[in-house]
Image: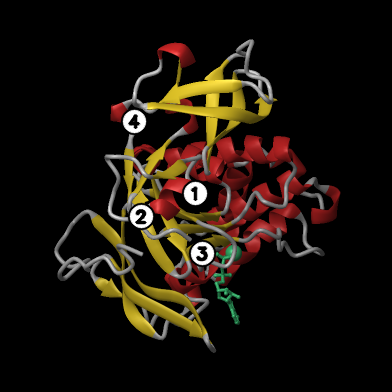
């Protein structure tokens, strides 16, 4: 696959005022498994980054390396000017929130938030005020005397956030913090995390396997696959200019087709389902793709069709509910030239 090892930028993290956290050639192996394969990445201060990718691609391992909970076999990490590799996790002062709420079950909400502060030497009214401020920040000021089991999952995760943010961490690290919650709460808390991060301007890295979550939250998405970074960029960049086939198919849907004139390196082109244009079959020109509708799913704003054309299958999304978009019907579409993606990367 192209771009598996993008060239590392020279002397990264040194001298560049925009780089806050810098990872260079980070490699981590577990026995025969290479969980991280020479990962390099620069994070700006105040940035919200999402590690996105399929299960097992190395997201958690990379987050744990940043947190200091995992020691890389190779590579280096810098925070501003200083090497971070030798700094133990607790001295990094990074706030961490995991998928499972991991609150102390026998401590009240307020005690849970206070605990980390006490470990770092906060005492008296300074500590108490900080606890109150944090609980207000996550809208739980009135729940401070409850025990974790008396709270909903969403509330428990808010406590975990308050606890992580209390000691004024330099970086906030979140590992799938929303994935144990049901859909509605997940969406609510997603918005809250974004607002919180904007308000505090805290450098944040969040692991997720949920594309929508990453697209909504991240300033930049780090799309990972099998221990490498396939592409880093804004959601629009990954969608509009996917670096390779993996990115094209992971972010949204992409029809990958062969046998067209303007093909890419591997003889493949890509076109998004919503970019295919319905044309009049009788008047179809040389660029027409004529096929039989195998499947038609009405999704409200669009109808998603599976079209069988020769030995290829395309997904086509048409606005609304076109009258003739029924299984068995013949349909002609064309690919507008400006919508063609040249696809790099061998077939899977
Ligand atoms: N402690 C460990 N021991 C052995 N293998 C591990 C360990 N942690 C992670 N791995 C392996 O490393 C790879 C990446 O795992 P992980 O970082 O948890 O992926 P993700 O968070 O993207 O799902 C997987 O193949 C996983 O099985
Ligand atoms: Mg994980």
Q: Nearer the viewer, mark 2 or mark 1?
A: 1
Q: Residue at x 45, y 80 (%)?
A: 28
Q: Which mark is residue 59?
A: 3
The location of residue 3, given as percent across then percent down, is 30, 63
Colour scheme of the rendered structure: secondary structure
Q: Which mark is on residue 339? A: 4
Question: Which corner quadrant of the image does residue 234 belong to?
Answer: top left
Residue pushed farthest bottom?
Answer: 31
In the depicted structure, whether residue 319 falls above or below residue 201: above
Mark nearest the camera among 2 and 4 is 4
| Point 73% across, 45% down: residue | 155
Mark 2 residue crowding within 10 angstroms, few (<14) / some (14–19) / many (20+) = many
Mark 1 lies on residue: 250
- Who comes first in sequence, dot 3 or dot 2? 3
SS category of the residue bearing label 4: helix
- Compared to 320, does 111 lie above or below? below
């Amino acid at each position: 696959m192209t771009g598996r090892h993008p060239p590392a930028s020279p002397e990264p993290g040194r001298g560049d005022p925009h780089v806050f956290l810098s990872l260079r050639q980070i490699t981590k192996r577990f026995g025969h498994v290479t969980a991280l394969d020479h990962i390099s990445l620069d994070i700006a201060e105040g940035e919200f980054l999402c590690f996105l990718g399929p299960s097992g691609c190395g997201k958690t391992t990379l987050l744990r390396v940043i947190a200091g909970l995992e020691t890389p076999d190779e590579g280096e990490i810098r925070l501003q000017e200083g090497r971070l590799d030798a700094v133990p996790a607790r001295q990094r002062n990074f706030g961490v929130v995991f998928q499972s709420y991991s609150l102390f079950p026998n401590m009240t909400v307020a005690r849970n938030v206070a605990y980390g502060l006490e470990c770092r030497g906060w005492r008296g009214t300074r500590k108490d005020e900080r606890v109150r401020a944090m609980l207000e920040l996550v809208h739980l000021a009135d729940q401070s005397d409850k025990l974790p089991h008396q709270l909903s999952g969403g509330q428990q995760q808010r406590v975990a956030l308050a606890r992580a943010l209390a000691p004024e961490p330099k970086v906030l690290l979140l590992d799938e913090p929303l994935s144990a919650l049901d859909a509605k709460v997940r969406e609510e808390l997603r918005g809250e995390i974004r607002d919180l991060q904007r308000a505090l301007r805290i450098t944040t890295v969040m692991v997720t396997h949920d594309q929508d979550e990453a697209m909504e939250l991240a300033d930049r998405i780090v799309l990972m696959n099998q221990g490498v970074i396939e592409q880093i960029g804004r959601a629009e960049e990954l969608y509009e200019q996917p670096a390779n086939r993996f990115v094209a198919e992971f972010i949204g849907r992409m029809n990958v087709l062969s046998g067209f004139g303007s093909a890419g390196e591997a003889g493949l082109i890509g076109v998004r389902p919503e970019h295919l244009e319905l044309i009049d079959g009788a008047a179809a020109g040389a660029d027409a793709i004529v096929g039989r509708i195998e499947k038609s799913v009405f999704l409200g704003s669009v109808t998603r069709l599976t079209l069988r054309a020769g030995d290829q299958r395309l997904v086509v999304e048409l606005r609304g509910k076109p009258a003739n978009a029924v299984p068995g019907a013949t349909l002609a579409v064309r690919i507008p030239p400006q919508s063609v993606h040249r696809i790099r990367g061998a077939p899977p």
